[in-house]
Amino acid sequence: MEEQFITPRKNRTKEHFQLALIQLIKEKGFRTVTVKDIVEYSKYNRSTFYTHYHDKFYLAEELLYSMFKGLEEAVGKPYQHNKEVNTEYLNTRSFEIITYVYRNRNFFELINFQDTIPEIHIIFPETILKIYQENFEFKTINNLPVNMDYFKRYTAYGFYGLLTNWINTGFKTSQEEFIKEVIKLSQTHMASVRYIGEREF
Amino acid sequence: MEEQFITPRKNRTKEHFQLALIQLIKEKGFRTVTVKDIVEYSKYNRSTFYTHYHDKFYLAEELLYSMFKGLEEAVGKPYQHNKEVNTEYLNTRSFEIITYVYRNRNFFELINFQDTIPEIHIIFPETILKIYQENFEFKTINNLPVNMDYFKRYTAYGFYGLLTNWINTGFKTSQEEFIKEVIKLSQTHMASVRYIGEREF
DNA sequence: CAAACTATGTCTATCTAGTAGACAATTAAA
DNA sequence: TTTAATTGTCTACTAGATAGACATAGTTTG
């Protein structure tokens, strides 16, 4: 195994392959996408594909991994100053994650397609859950005692439900509006949100 | 001057620069787009830009040229079998040009922007006129005698008007519907259309 | 079901297009 | 006016893109 350095050129090429994959999945479904399709669409030589990936599954995996890694990284940003926020004071900037999804909607729209990247429907909510588990502490209203593991799972999957609906309906509700709704729903049972993530910004 | 061969790789890179230019014009206007912007957006090295173009104007010019060349080439296709067509029998396939515009809408939308590629608003209608002049013969209804130069100019710019409106309104009317309208309007004064282009398909 | 075709993954050899960086000259901003 | 950013030109280097061959596996279709 050679040590692989990441050069801009490499990255660029890989991004083009990723983009091609996304478009082709939307056009004809993941199963039937061939390496040939991908290189024809992205206008690279077939050999080039194999210098970067072993097959389309590796490409899909990397795409999935990078997008959800980005999702995780987007989360803490708004909390770099105020670590603990009363839900009354949540605002549109508190949900960087939503902005991230919207910016990368071309990718996230893949959840609308039947024959899409394997595992995407599992990894998506589990990533949100992981974010909740590792980076946040919630307080219930009136400090009502609950099993926090369950509470996090409950709210993470709830948020996932809202998010996928937003994506599925073609982002009709504006980002602002959508975030407002999410805040309202959070306020029904959360008193405060505390960011405990380690990430530095 | 070295003889320059067109390789797939070269073409691909150029297309990426073209795409970057289109997006950046939409974002911030043509004037303020810098070469730096373009290479940052497309993720190439600045040197690479200069191996292909002298400056952004050359890039814009090539983009313009290739798009309108494509427009010209799209025109004759439907008439490869029936050279003369009674306007009664015009159908959705008769207007390959409209399909072309729609397929390349990302580019053609540039006409909506104030600060856009210079000359685009002149070259667009003049290209349509050129197509009419070089490739078609029209017969008026009842063989009503008209100056054919004027008639072609009149109908070419008329068509241009419809086309730009279609683009400006975000392609709300479907391709099919739009073509139907164009046919109806043609039928108000054209008896037949004859393709006299030289191009072979 | 066999023949014909298409796609896959691996490999070798070649070289061009992309890269990094320096430079003086312009242009824009503070 | 000074400072900073962008431009266009050049040189030198090489990573990554290319073409093509090959055996294998998977699909079509007659």
Image (cartoon, coloured by chain):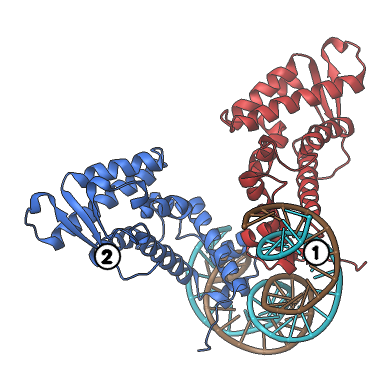
Chain colours: A red, B blue, C cyan, D brown
Query: Quadrant of residue A163 in the image?
Result: top right
Q: Nearer the viewer, residue B23 or A54?
A: A54
Vertical relation: B24 (above or below) A145 = below
The residue tagged with tag 1: helix, strand or loop? loop
Percent coordinates x, y for residue A188 in the rendering: 74, 13
Q: Nearer the viewer, residue B48 or B64?
A: B64
As shown in the figure, which amino acid type bears the numbered disc 1?
A: Ile
Q: In this image, B167 relative to A178: left or right?
A: left
Label 1 Cα crowd, 10 Å radius (few <14 / some 14-19 / many 20+) = few
As shown in the figure, which amino acid type bears the numbered disc 2?
A: Asn
Residue that appears at 33% across and 60% down = B81
Mark 1, chain letter?
A: A
The residue tagged with tag 2: helix, strand or loop? helix
Mark 2, chain letter?
A: B
Q: In this image, B12 relative to A77: left or right?
A: left
Q: In the rendered image, which residue does mark 1 sit on? A: A6
Q: In the rendered image, which residue does mark 2 sit on? A: B135
Percent coordinates x, y for residue B134 in the rendering: 25, 67
Percent coordinates x, y for residue A67 in the rendering: 75, 45
Label 2 Cα crowd, 10 Å radius (few <14 / some 14-19 / many 20+) = some
Q: CA distance from mark 2 to mark 1?
A: 52 Å
